[in-house]
Image (cartoon, rainbow, N blue to C red):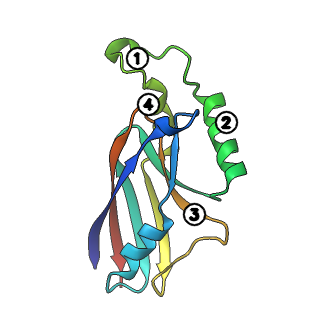
Amino acid sequence: MVISKTIQLHADPTANQQQMCIIDITHQVEQQVTGTDINSGIVTLFVAGSTAGISTIEFESGLLSDFQGMWERNAPKNIPYDHNRRWGDGNGHSHVRASLLGASLVVPFNDKRLSLGTWQQIVLVDFDNRPRSRQIVLQIMGE
């Protein structure tokens, strides 16, 4: 059986100095899984958009700060991007970061419980330089 669901979110990456918004969506994913007739299987998450990604992380302030710093070291905001020259929207770094993180994630579940580690949460990471409405598509598969 395959059931498709969506999670709608508003992300504002401009709300902090890093121009990055990290949202813990674990609870919303759990709710979508428990709201089905499927007891065991996998849930695939996919964020629609080229400037956001999905991953897992321990959602605590120190690690979130480390995570944000890593992106600035690996795909800095303030270097030249051809995308910015072409479109003038200043979010070339957002596209590069999102492509490195990836737009999808697969999480197994048993007895309607996500098989996450003790300190592991599912996060949407919005890298864009302006607020966005985000849609996460879930496909819940199993028996």
Residue at 48 percent of width and 78 percent of height = 109
Work out whether mark 4 precedes mark 3 in sequence or the reverse, and give the earlier one. Answer: 3
Q: Amino acid at mark 3?
A: Gln
Residue type at mark 1 is Asn
Q: Pick whichever of labels 1 and 3 is earlier in the sequence.
A: 1
Residue 57: x %, y % from top left: 61, 56
Dot 1 surroundings within 10 Å: few (below 14), some, or many (20 or more)?
few
Identified at 40% across, 33% down, the residue is 130
Q: Secondary structure at mark 1?
A: helix
Tell whether label 3 touches label 4 (CB within 8 Å): no
Real-space Cα distance between discs 1 and 3? 33 Å
| Disc on res. 121 | 3
Q: Which residue is mark 1?
A: 84
Q: Earlier in the sequence, mark 1 or mark 4?
A: 1
Based on the displayed image, in which of its 4 quarters is residue 138 positioned? Answer: bottom left
**Is 118 left, or right, of 42 in this rendering?**
right
Q: Are marks 2 and 1 in contact (CB under 8 Å)?
A: no
Q: Position of residue 114 (x, y in %)?
A: 51, 75
Residue 18, given in percent of the width and then of the height, sits at 58, 34
Q: CA distance from mark 4 to mark 3?
A: 24 Å
Instruction: Say which mark, if any, is on residue 3.
Output: none
Q: Residues within 10 Å of mark 3 (few under 14, many from 20)?
A: some
Q: Nearer the viewer, mark 4 or mark 3?
A: 4
Which x, y percent locates residue 22?
A: 53, 49
Measure how far apart labels 2 and 1 are at the Cα level.
22 Å
The residue that label 4 is drawn on is 129
Task: Return the residue at label 2.
Answer: 69
Point out the tag, 2 or 1, that comes first from the N-terminus: 2
Taking the image as shown, residue 71 lies to the left or right of residue 2, namely right
Would you say the residues marked 2 and 4 are in contact, meaning their CB atoms lie under 8 Å apart? no
Q: In this rendering, which labeled residue sits more in front, label 1 or label 4?
A: 4
Which residue is located at x 32 percent, y 46 percent?
133
